[in-house]
Amino acid sequence: MQINIQLQKILKINHPEIDLNDVHWKTSDSSLGSILFYKIGPHQQDEKTFLERISDAKYSWLVINRKIEPLPQNCQILEEVKWPELQKDILDILYPLPQLKLFGITGTNGKTTTTDLILQLGDEIGKKGISIGTLGVRTRGKTIEDFGLTSPSFIDLRKYLNRYGKDKDFCVMEVSSHALVQQRLYGLRFDGGGWLSFSQDHLDYHQNLENYFKSKCLIFDYLKPQVSLYLPSEQGELFQKIGAHYKNIIKAPTLKQDLPLFFKPQFNKNNLEVAVALIEDVFNEEIEIDFNKLVPPDGRFYIKKINDNYIVVDFAHTPDALENICRSLRETFSQYKLKVLFGCGGDRDRSKRPIMGQVVDRFADEIYVTSDNPRSENPEQIIQDIIKGIHNHPIKIVTERPLAVKQAFAELKSKEILLIAGKGHENYILINGVKHPYSDIQEVEDFINRK
């Protein structure tokens, strides 16, 4: 009863008979007793969609961002800029934050690997943690909830922290540029932060690199006082770019010891250095562990040796990530020929497609261009955008990704590496809103079993 009175007071409701016991942002999840937040888009069709959805929705109190006729029952209009504060006040009552050390990791590439490494390193020194990011909510080696985004909504994030963090020592989360701009971390403060890399991505949303950079810089607003942001020692240019605006940044110390194969590529060594520096800083404890105990997260530099060949599956889906892994494979396996199979996602930044083609053209001996997640776009048009950047090598175009992978397997010759890039851990191909079951990793496993 006390909780209901508190919620009524926050929402300024004068109807004691209205019982409030939860909060949601999706009509499909909401139920009687819920406070439902619904953002209505700016167009007339958005209003029509809202009225259709809300007529079937269950809730006890509705918060919307603009006036609409007819106004639904038990409805409050509140400008969207005030939503985070109101949602926080509600969540503080319904889903209070447990006492956790919080880590925030941003960067164009490397977020998933670094959060997973922090989770593993924490476990190695006896600290129990969870991670929240692209692979869902995880404990070490196990996904306990999957939500399909890099950063969940603010409401869902607070629920996950409350649900899974009560008996934990820390939580490490991926911090996307979208999450920062959209205040999905509202009210949280990090005990440790890392920024791993910066290169072109998400320009369909941010419009230009400067806006994208400024959105990343918002992570400084979420650091506790006196907390510094760690960067890889190798990221000198990024260090200077950030340092022109912010002073509380530190280069992670370089690791001198011999590292397992997974950390041979410079970008993964960077990720490990930041992970180690953050764990040692936040827990004030020097790490002395066998790095061979650490394993890559799903779909990140997954590597298998088959006879005298290697097959690598990686999530690399930006020009920078693709260049990093291609260069690393060239350096690590200098006696091998490199084959690269990749595509680009639909309904995303088109300008990076020919750039990714150029990257592969510089490093690969043979190139397969195929589909990724075309979403609502024509996959053949996406491929045509990609191959505008390829001029020095013959291109094998196989639109259907499963067929492309099988062809690449069949054409493997002695001492060749096949890099299958872009999807990593994903177990589907997204076409016109439908997820069709498919996994690069499973294709590799099946190929190994046939061998």
Image: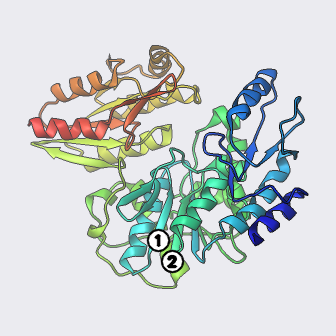
One can see residue 245 in this view: no
Is 109 rendered above or below residue 195? above
Instruction: Report if the CB atoms under discs 2 and 1 are less than 8 Å apart.
Output: yes
Residue 442 in the image: x percent, y percent? 26, 39
Is 385 rendered above or below residue 271? above
Pointer 2: what residue?
169
Q: Which residue does the image show at 72% across and 48% down from the upper left?
A: 182
In the picture, measured across the screen, residue 446 lies left or right of residue 160, that is left
Pointer 1: what residue?
129
Check residue 441 in the rendering and tell me which mark sits there, or answer none: none
Secondary structure under tag 2 reads loop
Query: Disc 1 residue type?
Result: Gly
Q: Which residue does the image show at 68% across and 44% down from the upper left?
A: 212
Is 100 rendered above or below residue 91? below
Q: Which residue does the image show at 80% across and 55% down from the upper left?
A: 18
> Rounded to the nearest whole Å, what is the CA distance between mark 2 and mark 1?
6 Å
Query: Disc 2 residue type?
Result: Asp
Colour approach in the figure: rainbow
Residue 257 in the image: x percent, y percent? 32, 73
Q: Nearer the viewer, residue 44 or 313?
A: 44
- Disc nearer the start of the sequence (2/1): 1
Label 1 neighbour load within 10 Å: few <14, some 14-19, many 20+: many
